[in-house]
Amino acid sequence: MSDILYPEIEPFERGKLRVSEMHELYYEQSGNPRGKPVVFLHGGPGGGTEPRHRRFFDPSVYRIVLFDQRGCGKSTPHASLVDNTTWHLVDDIEKLREHLGIDRWQVFGGSWGSTLALAYAEKYRHRVTEMVLRGIFTFAPDEMDWFYRTGTRVLFPDAYDDFIGALPKAERADPVASYHARLTSGDMDVRASAARAWSIWECRVATLLPDDDLVAHCDDASFSLAFSRIECHYFVNNGFLETPMQLLEQVDAIRDVPATIVHGRYDVICPMRNAWRLHRAWPESKLVIVPDAGHSANEPGVSRALIDATNAYRG
């Protein structure tokens, strides 16, 4: 991957932005301070940003903005679910844009980041120059059912048995609700155990081939608690959308936005169907199917396609 991504860089600015009485967001800027603005929307919800996320963009051209969404990464309070909804995050993006004095920017998001990118662009179309989306997830009911009940488990029965094995047998019919009860428990040991099982399940199935480093990352308590709590919180609330198909139903609002959709053919977290359905609703978008990849942006074919997309929009 080191030969695919742009070289490592350090931010030219790090800061905190208070977006509510409770929440303060960590953000950073890197690359060219006078360059083309792009905002990176990380996955999860609850995943947080990492230094490698800066490397999908030509630093001589792009003004690269990364931030940790409410409750995760370096944002505070850690793992908080209070006032943490899709629409709070959408408005946080807009507050950050205004704070940085940016008129319009490219929006780049993968997995949950693609969900948030669609929600933001559909509300603030006039602030978006282009979109680069990966591993499409729109909170359609069959997308949720696929990952937590009927789909992924067919290909990864061993990992799924470990996932539901952390729950009492009587509570396995609805694992998301059962995990939510544990992840919001007042017992920190119960929370930590549930967080570990929830996070490792996702990381075990995120790549076409096993990635022990990714699994180890998801086994780290400093990551798993916010990731699991915030993600499960969004999932039990159906993404806080007004209707189950809202993001697809409102795609007309962004039909004229130049957009590239990148999706791994063998993505078993967000199956190829998700990207195909979005592209069919939005035929003006460009769909790039990576033939030898799963869900992760770290897989070489996915990384290469994402960089091709950001390079194409440099001008």
Image (cartoon, rainbow, N blue to C red):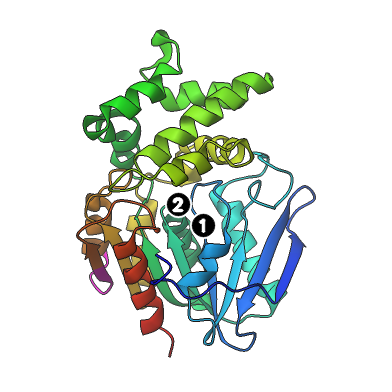
One can see residue 256 in this view = no
CB atoms of marks 2 and 1 within 8 Å: yes
Amino acid at dot 2: Trp
Count of marks placed on residues: 2
Q: Quadrant of the N terminus?
A: bottom left
One can see residue 154 in this view = yes
Mark drawn on residue 42? 1
In percent of width and height, residue 254 lies at 38, 71
Instruction: Quadrant for residue 118, please give it.
Output: bottom left
Magenta stretch containing residue 119, yes or no? no
Magenta region's main secondary structure?
A: loop
For residue 143, above or below residue 28: above
Mark 2 or mark 1: whose residue is earlier in sequence: 1
User: What range is drawn magenta here?
Assistant: 282-287
Mark drawn on residue 112? 2
In percent of width and height, residue 308 lies at 34, 77
In percent of width and height, residue 131 lies at 41, 72
For residue 1, above or below residue 209: below
